[in-house]
Each structure stands twice: as C-alpha cells, then as structure tokens.
Image: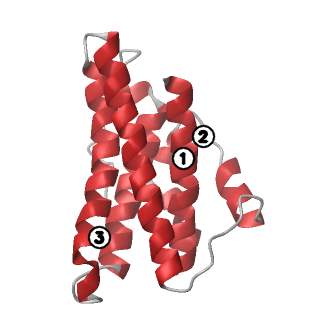
Amino acid sequence: MSYKSYTPNKKTGGYESLVVYWLGTTIYDLTVIFCKSYMSYKTNKAYTRTYDQMVQAARSGKQNIVEGSLENSVEGNLKLTGIAKASYGELLEDYKDFLRQNNLLLWDKEDPRVLQIRRTPDLKYKSYKSYKTYTSYIENSEGFANLVITLCYKQSYLLSRLL
C-alpha cells in the first residue's frame, strides 16, 4: 500500500485531521495484508467467509469515520461514529478467534510488546499514516494478530473519546 498520492489538506478540520481516521487507515491496510497472508483461499478454504468479513469490518470502520465527519447533523455524525466503533469491535473478535483457533497466544495488555505498540508516538499522526510503522510485528501470525488487536483497542478508546 502506498500513500504517495496523499496530498495534505491545507484546511483545518475534516476527517483527515482526525487521528482515528489515520489509525483506521492503518488498521484497514494491515487487515488486508493479514488476510492475504494468513487467511487466503489458497491457505485455508475455511477462512474465505471470515476473510471477507474482516476486510469489510476494517473498511467499514474507516469509511464510517469519513462519512460521519461529512455529516451535517450531530446526530448523523454520532450514529456513524458509533457504527465505526462497532465495526472495530467485530474485527477485534475475528482476530481473537484466529488466535484461539490456531492455538496462538493472545498477549496480555501489560505484555511489553503491547505496551510498546501502545507507546508508539503519533508524531502528529505520522505513525498512523503508514502500516510500515509496525513492520517488526508482522513477521508471524501471532505478532501480526496481536498488533491489530492492540490497535483496535486503541481505536475503540479513541472513538469513545470522540463520541
């Protein structure tokens, strides 16, 4: 995935100024890569439905943030932001299911690796503008799934604050 075509908006405000948008973009990109790597039809036929659901949940979360920020009414914005939060909750459960079904470890929230992910500095959202910030975690399925789980928890927290 490339962000070369991204041109910063000179205006303030809007969804491109929201850290939840950039984190959502990163979660979406990572989910597409994860599913292609570990849940493709070639890898395991049983995962085809889950693959589609995970990619759609990640996409829905990001797109509802965009749509909500473009809403004219506060009610519409709140509704779509709530839908985004629910999409990340669904995605979170799919990643947990993957770990459980493959006898992989779900890292505790106090695990040093989770703490490191949570501490990754925003640097004015630059860390979220590319999934490449997290390449050291995507070398195996356990680390990859736990990375996105941690980011989904972070996203849920941020969306709750936004609401």
Q: Nearer the viewer, mark 1 or mark 3?
A: 3
User: Is tag 3's residue or tag 2's residue first in the polypeptide sequence?
Assistant: 3
Could you tell me if residue 139 is visible in this image? no
Mark 2 and mark 1 in contact? Answer it, CB < 8 Å: yes
Question: Does 41 sit left or right of 62 as displayed?
Answer: left
Query: What residue is rendered at 57% in x and 67% in y?
Result: 146
At a point 57% along the width and 70% down the height, the residue shown is: 137
Which residue in the protein does label 3 denote?
Answer: 50
Residue 21 falls in which quadrant of the image? top left
User: Which residue matches tag 1?
Assistant: 127
Classed neighbour count for the residue bearing mark 1: other residues with Cα under 10 Å, few (<14), some (14–19), many (≥20): some
The CA span between labels 3 and 2 is 31 Å
Question: Which one is closest to the eye, mark 3 or mark 2?
Answer: 3
Q: Secondary structure at mark 2?
A: loop
Lower sequence index among marks 1 and 3: 3
The scheme the figure's colours follow is secondary structure
- Between residue 13 and residue 152, name the one nearer to us: 152
| Residue at the spot 71% in from the left edge and 58% down from the top edge | 109
The location of residue 22, given as percent across then percent down, is 43, 40
The residue labelled by disc 2 is: 122
Q: Secondary structure at mark 1?
A: helix
Cα separation, mark 1 vs mark 3, equals 28 Å
Name the spot of residue 160 as percent of width and height, x first: 53, 31
Where on the picture, by quarter, is residue 107? bottom right
Residues at marks 2 and 1, CA–CA distance in whole angstroms:
5 Å
Relative to 46, residue 93 above or below: above
Three-letter code, disc 1: Ser
